[in-house]
Image: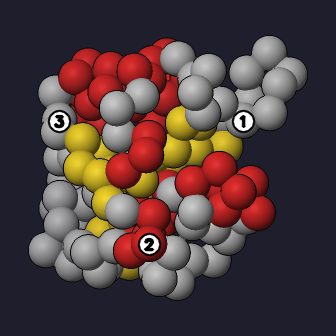
Amino acid sequence: MVGVGAGSRARVEDVLALIALTLREAGLSPGRVRELATVASAAERPAIIGAGARLGVPVRSWPAELLARVAVPNPSAAPLAATGTASVAEAAALVGGGTLLVAKRKSVVEGRRSAATCAVASRGHSEWNGPGRT
């Protein structure tokens, strides 16, 4: 599961580049991404919809109230103020249970604040486990 967050000015390329870099550095195959997950208020953002479309995977969204109840290692005031939950990427990746494989990563685009965040979790029976992890 890849959890993603994206600001309103994020581009599809921002989200895709961050996901690709995160997976590559973790030794995980991009071909094993099965869905993107995010907070409901961001699910219709073009960057997230476009990233899901280019990866050929669905985008699943969760209410901020639900994500706010998920314990995460890197909560932040910025998403809390913007969305009502202190975590989007990590909480969305973990909301169904599982193990966090890659903690929240932030993109940096042209020196401005992060345009996107992502985190990767395993569901136990997940695509990230077993032979052929990469």
Position in image of residue 70 (x %, y %): 46, 80
Q: Distance between the residues labelled 3 and 2?
A: 24 Å
Earlier-in-chain disc, 2 versus 1: 2
Q: Which of 66 and 101 is in front in this view?
A: 66
Q: Is residue 46 left or right of residue 55?
A: right
Residue shown at 73% from the left, 64% from the top: 76
Which quadrant of the figure contains the N terminus? bottom left
- Mark 1 element type: loop
Q: In this view, does 122 lie to the left or right of 45?
A: left
Q: Which residue is labeled 2 in the image?
A: 65
Can you tell which mark lies on residue 114? 1
Q: Which residue is labeled 3 in the image?
A: 57
Q: Nearer the viewer, residue 67 or 24?
A: 67
Position in image of residue 122 (x %, y %): 30, 69
The residue type indicated by label 1 comes to Ser
Q: Nearer the viewer, mark 2 or mark 1?
A: 2
Q: Nearer the viewer, mark 3 or mark 2?
A: 2
Binning the other alpha carbons within 10 Å of mark 2 as few (below 14), some (14 to 19) or many (20 upward) gives few
- Mark 2 element type: helix
Q: Quadrant of residue 81?
A: bottom right
The residue type indicated by label 3 comes to Val
Residue shown at 58% from the left, 27% from the top: 8
Confirm whether residue 92 shows in the render: yes
* 38 over 24 or under it: above or below: below
Q: In which quarter of the image is residue 103?
A: bottom right
* 68 over 85 or under it: above or below: below
Q: In this view, does 117 lie to the left or right of 49?
A: right
- Mark 3 element type: loop
Residue shown at 83% from the left, 25% from the top: 112
